[in-house]
Structure formats: structure tokens, C-alpha cells
Amino acid sequence: MILVLGGTSDSIEICNLLNQYKLCYVVSVTTSYGEELARKCTDSVLLKKLTIEDMVDYIKEHSITKIIDATHPYAVEVSRNAIKACETSEIEYLRFERESLINKIDYDNKYIVEDIEEACKIANNLGNNIFIGTGSKNLHLYKEMIKDKNLIARILPTSEVLINCEEIGFNADNIIAMKGPFSEEMNEVTYRQYNIDLVITKESGSAGGFLEKVNACKKLNIPVIIIKRKGINYPNKVGSIEELKGLI
């Protein structure tokens, strides 16, 4: 039995591959939206935030022989837990992550930073209408650290996410509730509509529409702040479905 740590579009591709190979697996997700995505591929879905202890217990109880970690590149705690759980249980850990696209950016008006705190420090000195394209998870940090600016957040259109945004002080004027990924043209229209003069994004992969966000900034000459992925020394890593085929 394979345990897939999912919640991303890449994890859906992996599930489709496992279905094709008729392999037994279960998908672990942490949000109801992630569960909804996973159930398009399988009924074997675990909706729970797993600690190291949870993972070790689950591995033992369900005879897990391999973990395929397809979580978001910024979900570093989950990945670290999975690596340790695999070491403890003496099973294989395999990380699936698309290659970084930062080196493919052809735009000088960019700021590449290590974390949200550094991004907010720069944002406090740039622009007034700031587009946050990093998802909803850490919006409270932007709200706390960016002062006297108009923040526009693009988020998933789910009730859970919308309620969270409202609770931390975002209202209808500050929320774009849409499901991506978005084309360069769509991003350009959005930036124009909201008079955006600074964009903050994460270094997501091609599936997340990363280059489309940056290229729209280039077209409109809007500065962009890019939060780098956290570096983890993954013991075993692949970057494409073709590579994965030879390891399952």
C-alpha cells in the first residue's frame, strides 16, 4: 500500500498514474478542498493533519510500504515529518516536486526573498495596491506586517477560506475568490482592474501558474516579490511523472 501526501494538482496526476498501474494507495489531505480533488481519483482518502506519530502509526496499521510526498513546496513541516516517519518505519520516501522556474524569469523588476517577513519589509516601501498571490494560509501575517496599504488577496472560492479571510479583516473589496491556475492575460486584466502596483507570489511550479503571474507583471512593469521555496535535503526526489514511472 502506498501513502500519497496530496492536496496539489501534481498529486492528482500521481493518483491517475497509480490507477493506471492498478496499485493500491491512499491519499492524505489536510483540507476539505484537497479531499474533494482527491475523491475524483479514489475513495481512499484520509482527511487529517498527520503528526510524525500519526504517520508512523498509520504506516504500521495499514502496511504502508512507500510514501510519495506530493505536498506543496512550502509545506515543509509535513515533508520533514514524512521523511522522519519513513526513517523510523524503514520504508521508502519519495518526493515529487517540479523544478524551480526562478531561473526562467526574464524580468529585472523583481525581488527574490527568503520568507514572508522579508517580503513584507519590502512591500512596506513599495506600492499601495498590493496583490497577494500566495494563497490564504498566511494572509494574517501580511495583514499584521504590511501597514497602511490596500491588500488584494486571490483565494480559493470555498466557504472555509472566505470565512477565514473575513475573520482576519479582509472584506469583499479585498478578496478575489477564484480557482486557478490563471493565464497571463487573466492576471494582466486582474492587475489592471484593481490598479495593482506590487505583486507578492510564491515560487510555485508550472501547475500553479507562477510564470503567468510574473509575465503579467513584466507586461505592465509592476514590481514582483517572489518568496523562494524552503530548501530541504530530500533523500529521494523526482520532478516529472515520467521519472516517477520508473520508481513505483
Image (tube, grey):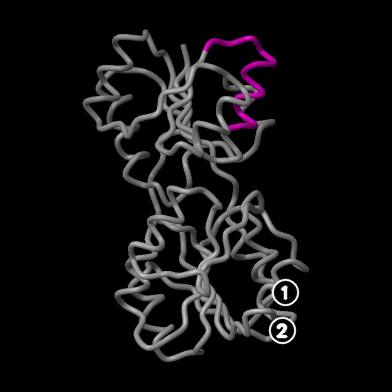
Q: Residue at x 29, y 11 (%)?
A: 60
Q: Residue at x 40, y 55 (%)?
A: 163
- Look at the numbered disc 1 and give the secondary structure of its residue: helix
Residue that label 2 marks: 220
Which quadrant of the view contains residue 43?
top right
Which labelled disc corresponds to residue 19?
none
Asked which quadrant contains residue 100, the reply is: bottom right
Residue located beneath label 1 in the image: 188
Viewer-nearest of discs 2 and 1? 1
Q: Whole-percent x and y of residue 176?
A: 57, 65
- Which secondary structure, mark 2? helix
Q: Measured from the top left, where is residue 186 in percent x and y?
A: 74, 66
Res 165 visible: yes
- Within 10 Å of the Cα at label 1, are there few (<14), some (14-19), or many (20+) other Cα atoms? many
Which amino acid type is shown beneath numbered disc 1? Glu
**132 relative to 195 in the view: left or right:** left
Return the residue nearer the eye: 174 or 183: 174
Residue 15 falls within the magenta-colored stretch: yes
Quarter of the image with the C terminus in it: top right
- Indicate the position of residue 199 as horizontal and vertical percent values: 55, 76
Position above or below: 92 against 229: above
Q: Do the CB atoms of the residues marked 2 and 1 lie less than 8 Å apart? A: yes
Examine the rendered structure and indicate whether residue 19 appears above or below residue 10.
Answer: above
Numbered range of the magenta stretch: 12-24
The residues tagged by marks 2 and 1 sit, at their Cα atoms, a distance apart of: 7 Å
Q: Residue 171: x percent and y percent?
A: 45, 70
Residue 5 on the magenta span: no
- Mark 2 / mark 1, whichever is N-terminal: 1
Q: Nearer the viewer, residue 56 or 243?
A: 56
**Residue 244 vs residue 208, the one in the foreground:** 208
